[in-house]
Image (cartoon, grey):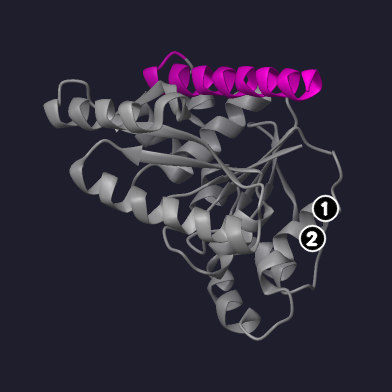
Amino acid sequence: MRILAITNQKGGVGKTTTCVNLAASLAATKRKVLVIDLDPQGNATTGCGIDKSKMQHTIYHVLIGEKSLRDVMQRSERGRFDVVPANRELAGAEVELVNEFARETRLKSALAELGDAYDYVLIDCPPALNLTTVNALTAAHAVMIPMQCEYYALEGLSDLVNTIKKVRAHLNPHLEIEGLLRTLFDNRNTLAQQVSNELAQHFGDKVYRTVIPRNIRLAEAPSYGVPVLLHDKTSKGAKAYLALAGEIINRHVVSNRQVAAN
């Protein structure tokens, strides 16, 4: 089971879009996938076609110790993957957990109960460094960072890298950066090209080859409660996320071979 935290402290960079559409694309390759919505806005939940307002139990109840992940899971029937939903109740977890024992490892402990039931677990993090994000980083094997290629993105990226270093030092020594994903990309934009080149120079093969374009079908899909693959599988957005899924799977095959060889 590979656990990826999809995070960026900057909002509006395509975290939720990436989480939902990568999940559907991995599921299309017959992988077993679980999406965990860790954002009180619950956008990943609704993007998977689940009505967050009707959820009696969510990730909030898992973090405060009342329910297990299996207790609160929903099925995205059309996406063919499982979802742990979130709604505004999750915002209360910050306050309730502040004095609790092992508050940073609640999600890690909950995931341990699943064993190897899934090939991939994708965690959609809120656009902030708070206790829920720390739970995700503590539970994850690696971090995927979606980012727009604009000037301020580089500034925010250095903050996030420092945060990952702190979590690695104190809570999760094996945490690594899985990759940087260029999103909402417009190749006609000169600045976007420049920032993209800077990322490649600085992070090398940590930057995914796949680039997610600015695409109207990607923007429309959440309003229908489906991943873009089910909204318009011929769109550039759908093809890009299928390519990303393939790239991720290939990386892990190579990584596993290297581990076996050693």
State the image coordinates of residue 51 (x, y, percent, origin top left): 59, 54
Please give the label number shown on residue 112: 1
Label of residue 109 in the image: 2
Q: Are marks 2 and 1 in contact (CB under 8 Å)?
A: yes
Residue 210 sits inside the magenta stretch: no
Amino acid on which the number 1 mark rests in the picture: Ala
| Residue at point 73%, 25% (across, down) | 31
Q: Is residue 8 visible?
A: yes
Residue 244 lies in the magenta-colored region: yes
Q: Where does the C terminus fall, quadrant-wise?
A: top right
Q: Find residue 5 and report its horizontal and vertical position in percent.
A: 57, 47
Magenta stretch, residue numbers:
234-262
Report the quarter where the N terminus lies.
Answer: top right
Q: Position of residue 182 (x, y in %)?
A: 36, 31
Lateral position of residue 161 relative to residue 177, left or right: left
Helix, strand or loop for the magenta stretch, by majority: helix
Q: How many numbered badges does the structure rendering display?
A: 2
Name the quadrant containing residue 110. bottom right
**Residue drawn at (51%, 22%), measured in percent from left and top?**
244
Task: Give above or below for 190 relative to 154.
Answer: above
